[in-house]
Image: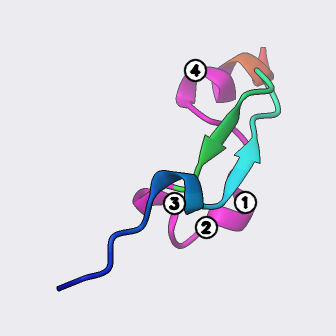
Amino acid sequence: MAKMIKKADLPQKICLTCGRPFAWRKKWERDWATVKYCSDRCREAKRG
């Protein structure tokens, strides 16, 4: 049986737009080092 990882144990970053912490997601596995924003909304807000 696979070992469960708690969300609190995942790496976190601070969003550059809203300043909130966000946790690692499976879809960011390959490019976690380049992720800067917690959501598409924050990414779009930074441009404008």
SS for callout 4: helix
Disc 1 crowd, CA 10 A, few/some/many (<14, 14-19, 20+) = few
Looking at the rendering, the stretch of residues picked out in magenta corresponds to 25-44
Q: Are marks 2 and 3 in contact (CB under 8 Å)?
A: yes
Q: Residue furthest left?
A: 1
Q: Earlier in the sequence, mark 3 or mark 4?
A: 3
- Circle 3: residue type: Trp
Amino acid type for the residue under numbered disc 1: Thr
The amino acid type, in three-letter code, at marker 4 is: Arg
Q: On the image, numbered disc 2 is attached to which residue?
A: 31
Gap between marks 2 and 1 measured at Cα: 6 Å
Task: Specify few, some or many for label 2: CA neighbours under 10 Å numbering under 14, 14-19, or 20 or more.
Answer: few
Q: Which residue is mark 3?
A: 28
Element at label 3: helix
**26 shown above or below 21:** below
- The tag earlier along the polypeptide, 1 or 3, is 3
Identify which amino acid the numbered label 2 is placed on: Asp
Q: Which residue is mark 1?
A: 34
C-alpha span from label 2 to label 3: 5 Å
At 51% from the left and 60% from the top, the residue drawn is 28
